Image (cartoon, helix red, strand yellow):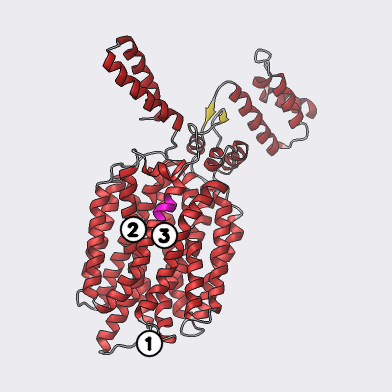
Amino acid sequence: MTDYLFAVKRKVRYSKLTHPNNGHIEDELEAVSLMKDADDDEEEIVYSQVNRKWEGNQGETFTVEQGVETIGFGLFQLRLFAICGLFSAADSLEMMLLAVLSPVLRCEWQLEQYQVAFITTVVFIGMCIMAPVWGFIGDRFGRQKTLIIISMWIGYYGFLTTFSPSYLWILILRGLVGGGMAGSPQSFALLTEYLPLKYRAKLLNLISMTWAAGTVFEITLASIVLPTLGWRWLLAFSSIPAICIVVLLKFIPESARYLVAAGRKEEAIPILESMARMNRSKLPSGNLTASDAEVRGNPRDLFSASYLRTSLQIFVLWFGTALSYYGMVLASAEILQLHNVEKTGGKCKCNLLKHADYNSMIVSTLGEFIALPLNIFLIDVIGRRWTGAMNMFGCGLFFILLQLPVSQEVLTLFIFMVRGFSSGMFNFVYIYTSEVYPTTIRTLGLGICSAFARVGAMITPFLAQVLLDRSLSAAVWVYGLIGIFCAVCAVMLPIETKGRALPVIYLFIIFTYYLQTLLVLKMIYHKDQSFKIYMYHFHSRICCRLKI
């Protein structure tokens, strides 16, 4: 009886595959062969694969993006979010380390202000050099492998910095750490490609909170370790998370969009099937196909007619955002030190941060937690451009207010506001850049934008540490005006990406669209009405294909 029910069960499930009118004898033999020793879970997988093959023979197809949208949000995305969030937090430890390490090294090695600033600058020089390299590697060899290499790189050179015998070795090793940190946008790009459109902006805002959590942890760690064990132990402890995250990165999937673009569809299908099982959902019917004809991007695409103005403005925004955000990270310690000097009436290279100063830095960092939920709401209500402009204007305004002679509580509030708005700026440029560029050049675009950001970050130590030490008023006015200029630039962006799916350029269609335009011009010149009707329908089909 059991054998009979077993046979009936499979006969029903595969009836459409083996129907005589369909003539799929090969599919029947494949199904019987694969199902012979399959248990219930394996049966679902086999059925899914064979059924999809049958439906693909009927001409039905789906893209990776359609698959992600159909499967929806669930456990798969939550797991990916958690791992990418931990990667972001580990990355932020190395960045916040620069703010709390500078006063100690200035005191211990009797460094000049420009030498302290150069410790930070060399980190961003490494980032600037390596950002396009990681973007290229990510687009050629995949996101997952690249992230593992990046994490090992950061942890290894971060730990080696612990043994630096001199100022020169600090510069070399921190520069190498910065080179690894340049690849951090890879995790952001990977998470973006697996998020359904409905949840994308919200989750990308939330992952910025993991960065903020990492900075709070680093300041807390510094307040405990620096006074007791010293700066070398702080460097050692700060490198451990980057090393540990390598294990977790093995559990994240490769980008399905990358695999399809690389012509490896057979590797992308199991990933999507796994996502469907974890989310208790199903893939669309048919065979997986490229979203249009996915091809490898090249830097020239960033400066094509469609993206030239957008790219130039995005580069300016990334430059201003990094200048402002990292400027506040560094300036917070310097401003609190200046406030202590004004109260004591003296100036000394060994004016180290006090416990109250660490508390002020932690409180000001909490501004990122307050601002990010607000951005989650606004970015889908008023749009990307106006949300970005609001953050940039607010950042510039409160930077200017930092020069006012106020109490430490009010000063902490101003720093709190700048940290919140500057974090919102970074969140905006990451989301906007991920959405405005097509898959084929998205990681490359993020890499080049990141390089422009690092240029701003390379300059900011000389504003936040050298210029601010000489004139607080001059430094905050520079930051304030840059923030206001970026706000104007954000409003004038030519493309609003609110509600827009991640695009994939079909270069063949674009070429035919361009050719069709030339033919239309020729048709208009010759006044050929029959040809005009034909080209009108051709134009409609192309527009539907491009979804414009």
- Nearer to the camera, 19 or 131: 131
**Residue at the disc numbered 1:** 350
Which circle marks residue 110 in the picture?
A: none
Q: Residue at x 35, y 79 (%)?
A: 113
Q: Which residues are magenta?
A: 446-450
In the picture, measured across the screen, residue 364 lies left or right of residue 442, that is left
Work out which quarter of the rendered image holds the C terminus and state it: top left
Disc 2 is placed on an element classified as helix
Q: Residue at x 57, y 41 (%)?
A: 259
| Spatial CA span between label 2 and label 1 | 32 Å
**Residue at the disc numbered 2:** 319
State the image coordinates of residue 486 (x, y, percent, origin top left): 26, 55
Marks 1 and 3, the one that precedes in the sequence = 3
In the picture, measured across the screen, residue 345 lies left or right of residue 275, that is left
User: In this orientation, does residue 187 appear?
Assistant: no
Marks 2 and 1, the one that precedes in the sequence = 2
**Labels 2, 1: front one:** 2
Name the main secondary structure of what is drawn in magenta.
helix
Q: Say what amino acid the circle numbered 3 marks.
A: Met
Quadrant in the picture for residue 469:
bottom left
Q: Say what amino acid the circle numbered 2 marks.
A: Phe
Q: Say what amino acid the circle numbered 1 marks.
A: Cys
For the image, the number of numbered tags is: 3
| Spatial CA span between label 1 and label 3 | 33 Å
**Residue at the disc numbered 3:** 209
In the picture, measured across the screen, residue 147 lies left or right of residue 452, that is right
Within 10 angstroms of label 3, few (less than 14), some, or many (20 or more) residues? many
User: In this orientation, does residue 345 appear?
Assistant: yes
